[in-house]
Image (cartoon, helix red, strand yellow):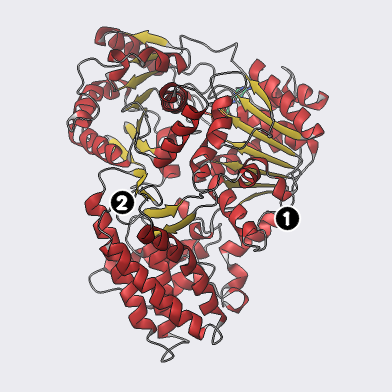
Amino acid sequence: MARVAQALAPEGALARAWPEWRAREAQAAMAQAVAQTVEEGGALLVEAPAGSGKTLAYLLPWLLSGRRAVISTSTHVLQRQLAERDLPRLASATGQAVRVAVLKGRGRYVCLARLQAAVDMGPRIGAPAEHAWLRELLLWAERGGDGDLDQVAGVDTIAGLHGRVTSTSENCARQACARWAECHVERARRAAQAADVVVINHHVWLAELQRQRRGRPRLLPEVDVVVFDEAHALHGLRARLDAEVIEHTALQRLWADLTALADGPLRGLQAWRLLAHDGQVATRGLAQALGAAVSREGRQAWPLGDRQAPWRLATAVAAAQAALRASADADPRLGRLLERTRAAAAVLHTLLSSDDPAAVWLDWQSREDWACLRPAVENDALAAHALVTGTSLGARSVVHASATLGQDEALLWHRDALAVGADWSPRTLRLRVGDEDPGAAALYVPEGLPEPAEATHPQALAERIVPWIELLGGRCLVLATTRRAAQRLAQALQARGRPGWRVLLVGDKPTHAALQALRHAGGGAPTIVVACGALWQGIDVPGEALQLLVIDKLPFAPPDDPWLQRRLERARAVGADPFTSVQLADAAMALRQGAGRLIRRAGDRGLIVIGDVRLRRRAYGPALLAALPACRWLDTEGEVQAWLGELEALTRSSTTDRPSAS
Ligand SMILES: Nc1ncnc2c1ncn2[C@@H]1O[C@H](COP(=O)(O)OP(=O)(O)OP(=O)(O)O)[C@@H](O)[C@H]1O
């Protein structure tokens, strides 16, 4: 602990290594608490404001302890930020050598063999551009690097492409593969076993727990310490814990793999092709029926009253299962395919046999991207315990870090949302930042906008912010509550913006590339990044590169979200007010996360615009405003103009952009 204090002291190793380094009280307090947890074992929940430097506050004590760790964060982008920026910078400042590995899900890595096969097949009729793209991807993947698809645009947006360039555990030939020695998945897994720290995301963590439950070999090494950064993001996964899940992409892959076996080693053995075809048709039919029935993105009760489409899929799955069972001895791959049909059969069985509309949930993003899940009926405290502690990796110490774990010292919001059970008793630490500058950010809630549910809302909001973006020369991040709203806002900004503006919609553009464009735009083309979902948390764009943060509306979870319903019931059962303790608390935490993207270090200045008039009109408005980081509240457009004028003058007077770490 003394070494931690020394490194953080005003003349310590970090101050010597980084010109921009400033001693921060909250950061030092957090680092000491983490050091104690790493040394003594146990669990620590720590909340400190966005931008207060939590990453370093948990990395430093772990690094100096010399122990092995897994660090799990919420997104791929944050994995990169940790592995490529924060860890190397800290290792070099402290002179501590550290082997870092990043591990993502198998589906995030290029499979060289499958990609090569897709290229060798030649262009598909009517899709020459796709073939050129595949060739370029192969060149890129063979050039070295880690084959990480998050660095490439297009793969998730061109239908069917993802499955052709990545592998699954069933279609992977392992040692028999001609490209085994260069396999990106294998390399990542081997690197994880040998590393001092493995940086994963929460989805990989959930998948690891599921592997363990099914008795499969572990991918993560034994470690002493597990850190969950952005720990609040575990809440979304809690709903999936022990659930049976079928994802649309997994279904498509199942049928594609069956077709591939039918065309290859199993030719003539069964009517495999027909079975795969029926499965594909039934899957498409279900996607279409769902697409016509859903009215919003996200988790919801099963929306189809008519059971025809799921019934067709259940029939196709059952037929495939019967054939696979009958032939499982002929080829081990059939046994693996059979295992893959199990979750689909279980979910579909429940769907068709239960009258309870909440027995199966739908998680909907688009016709290409949806999942059905059968939630765990039992509230399995043991599984929840495994999710939050990391003891299954042998960890003695676990740290949960986030800017949003609760509104009280016991951080009850986080613990309630995880539904772990009363016998989990972590230490808690809630830090405020003493050196926070309440004059650094200003907040404006525009008057006169339509209510956020109105169809005209995105255009009206875009119109309002265009002059401000123009004045600042871009430097703008727009956070939308849904993917649809993000698309509409990006379109509206493109249509109403000035020639030469770069409006980058995350999704069309890889997140990392969009953020780099914002970070390095400087005085060049005005850059606006529009995003939803993951970018509400953790993203770090320090300095003048980001001065205008726009949040489209209050991030209330849809009231018909079945997991939310369960949480509301639990709150009622213990006599708490469900709206205040769950819905309002969730929205306040999400809003605080989003707003925290703006001020990242001393000297940062900017404007937060929240385009939701409910903040002004509804009784809960003040409670939400109180949850935001300290800032000046602006009341009129005149005050906004004056504040932006100040920002613009500051930017102009700095000869270059301050160095912004990428
Ligand atoms: N003591 C320090 N002096 C100067 N800059 C710092 C210091 N500590 C951290 N930083 C910088 O402050 C920024 C915010 O740090 P970091 O990303 O760790 O924030 P955080 O608390 O994890 O925020 P969030 O909750 O939003 O993820 C980063 O650019 C980081 O390099």
Q: Which residue is mark 1?
A: 194
- The quadrant of the picture showing ligand 1 is top right
Instruction: Classify mark 2: residues with Cα within 10 Å, few (<14), some (14-19) or many (20+).
Output: some
Question: Residue 427: x and y, percent?
Answer: 70, 26
Horizontal side, residue 601 vs residue 551: left or right: right
Question: Considering the numbered disc 1 on the image, is that residue within a helix, a strand or a loop?
Answer: helix
Q: Is residue 4 above or below residue 81?
A: above
Q: Amino acid at mark 1?
A: Ala
Q: Is residue 349 above or below residue 82?
A: below
Q: Is residue 641 above or below residue 532?
A: above
Task: Please give the label number shown on residue 587.
Answer: none
Please count the marks in the image.
2
2 or 1: tag closer to the N-terminus: 1
The residue that appears at 46% across and 9% down in the rendered structure is 439
Residue positioned most to the bottom: 268
Q: Amino acid at mark 2?
A: Ser
Q: Is mark 1 within 8 Å of ligand 1?
A: no
Question: Residue 299: x and y, percent?
Answer: 38, 44
Horizontal side, residue 402 vs residue 161: left or right: right
The residue that appears at 79% across and 40% down in the rendered structure is 66
Given residues 423 and 47, the one toward you in this image is: 423
Which of the two discs, 2 and 1, sits closer to the camera? Answer: 2
Residue 515: in sight, yes or no? no
Q: Which residue is mark 2?
A: 366
